[in-house]
Image (tube, grey):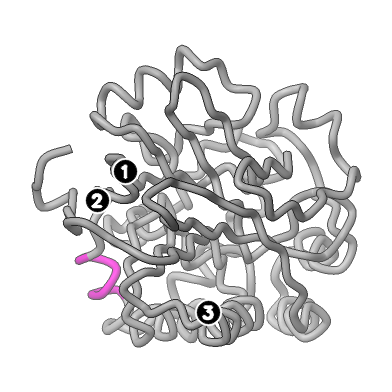
Amino acid sequence: MTDSPQIRHLGTLTGKLLIFGGPYSNLQALAELKSIAEKLEVAPQNIICTGDVVGYCAQPEESAQLVKDWGIHCISGNVEQNIVSGEDDCGCNYAEGGRCDIFSRTWFPYAVRSLSENSAGWMANLPQHLSFDYAGKSVAVVHGSPSHVSEYVFKSTTWATKEKHFQTTRSEVVLAGHAGLPFVDVRDNRYWLNAGVIGMPANDGTPRVWYLLLDDKDGELSYSFESFSYDNTLAHRLMHENELPEAYAKTLLSGIWDNCEILPEAEKERQGVALSTNTSPMANPY
């Protein structure tokens, strides 16, 4: 990737990196992750959010302000881009008339009217992609894919599709979001890594949420997927009090998605199967 108003190049990063996606207006999860980062002594300049700061949960303004004030790197997700452009839906690429599409007609307008001009202005200045060098490798950060912010790329997505995106970004490592599930796919010394999201569980039957750690110790890239718990009962209660979709509020407690309409068959089959935390260099929770 070359520099443009949509692409921000960060130069070379070193040391431990913390990557996370999709806060989805879940302030309780976001605040807990900030506390974890501080305990791990990961500085804000080494923390990256893959977008969708705003989403299904009850505190979009507070979440946007926390990320802004934290001073971390953040790209715009489809939600931020559609808020800035004045669209009337989230741009998640849901099937028209499906449950996700119907639910979005409640939470998206709620998010829009909850945001301050300050937060909307901050979103308008977020880059769509990041690029940097790390552990001797070129890295690209995208939301869905470099081709489209709302493209779903999963573990089961063909390598040919991923290979096309590696070529587009001229990168050896892609850090992506949007899909909602943590996973890694590694071939030919190229890495597609998705940290998952912190605003909703990973459809594995547990309320835990996930983030990703990268390390460049000894000049080699290593990674681990990490999970954490937070005050999901408060997040659930706030969604209920603000009349947001109860199906999504229940997911915060059950760890099961209301529906799997966005998922390929391979990922649908793993619904309710608890992911395991594995801190080995080749960790692969999904």
The residue that disc 1 covers is 139
Residue type at mark 1: give it.
Val
Which quadrant of the view contains residue 35?
Answer: bottom right
User: Residue 115 occupies which quadrant of the picture?
Assistant: bottom left
Q: Position of residue 68 (x, y in %)?
A: 34, 80
Q: Nearer the viewer, residue 167 or 237?
A: 167
Q: Is 137 positioned to the left or the right of 252 in the image? A: left
> Label 2 to label 3, Cα distance in Å?
21 Å
Which segment did they paint magenta? 120-125
Dot placed on the residue nearer the N-terminal end, 2 or 3: 3
Q: Secondary structure at mark 3?
A: helix
Task: Give whichever of discs 3 and 1 has the lower sequence position.
Answer: 3
Residue 253 painted magenta:
no
Kindly report the secondary structure that dominates the magenta region of the rendered protein.
Answer: helix
Q: Nearer the viewer, residue 33 or 89?
A: 33
Labelled pair 2, 3 in contact (Cβ < 8 Å): no
Check residue 132 in the rendering and tell me which mark sits there, or answer none: 2
Residue 60 sits above or below residue 3 on the image: below
**Relative to residue 224, is residue 29 depicted above or below?**
below
The answer to whether the residues at label 1 and label 2 have Cβ atoms under 8 Å apart is yes
Residue at 55% from the left image edge and 16% from the top image edge = 158
